[in-house]
Image (spheres, rainbow, N blue to C red):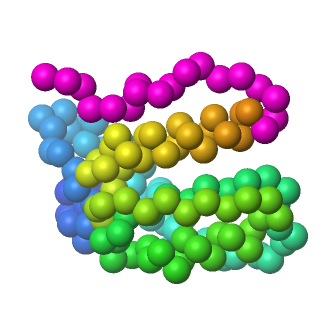
């Protein structure tokens, strides 16, 4: 068994993964993670003109891999608006700050849709934590 077929890759990459009894599911999940890691490690930036659309960047305040400065660099990739959202948590902040992340994403998508003259379903409150 290679490291890519075990949870070892998740420990090395600081990726929390819930182990499952389903070895096929684990294998598919780990192969997907492998593809993501390879893409991120082999990507080479090529300078091109900035996009003519808004960009929203999302990150975790405690992420040891992607800093606020790294995300701020996306600002130069657009001639339109740029929004940076930072949340409590690490690289997978969307787990630790799910409701705030989804609310920010919803607000940004609603703004983009309204600027394009499109209507979107009312999403307010849909991302709030369920009441007990």
Give the x, y percent position of residue 121: 59, 19
Quarter the C terminus occupies: top left
- For the point 37% across and 59% down, the residue is 87
Q: Is residue 114 above or below residue 100?
A: above
**Splitting the image into 4 quarters, where does residue 80 fall?**
bottom right
Decide if residue 100 is on the left or right side of residue 119: left
- For the point 30% across and 61% down, the residue is 88
Give the x, y percent position of residue 55: 68, 56
**Splitting the image into 4 quarters, where does residue 47 fall?**
bottom right
First to last magenta residue range: 115-132
| Residue 125 covered by magenta stretch | yes
| Residue 39 covered by magenta stretch | no
Please identify the residue farthest to the top as the structure is shown.
Answer: 121
- For the point 82% across and 29% down, the residue is 117
Q: Is residue 97 visible?
A: yes
Give the x, y percent position of residue 107: 56, 40
Of 18 and 66, nearer the camera is 66
Quarter the N terminus occupies: bottom left
**Splitting the image into 4 quarters, where does residue 82 fall?**
bottom right
Of 60 and 7, nearer the camera is 60
Of 45 and 35, nearer the camera is 45
Q: Is residue 31 visible?
A: no
Of 53 and 21, nearer the camera is 53
Decide if residue 8 is on the left or right side of residue 21: right
């Amino acid at each position: 068994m290679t490291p890519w077929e075990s949870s070892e890759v998740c420990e090395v990459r600081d990726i929390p993964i819930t182990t499952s009894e389903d070895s096929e599911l684990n294998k598919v999940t780990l192969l997907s993670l492998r593809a993501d890691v390879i893409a991120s490690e082999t990507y080479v930036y090529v300078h091109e003109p900035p996009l003519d659309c808004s960009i929203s960047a999302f990150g975790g305040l405690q992420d040891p891999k992607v800093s606020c400065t790294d995300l701020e660099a996306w600002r130069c990739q657009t001639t339109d608006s740029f929004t940076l959202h930072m949340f409590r948590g690490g690289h997978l902040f969307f787990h630790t700050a799910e409701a705030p992340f989804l609310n920010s994403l919803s607000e940004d998508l609603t703004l983009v849709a309204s600027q394009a003259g499109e209507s979107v379903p009312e999403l307010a409150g849909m991302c709030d934590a369920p009441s007990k």
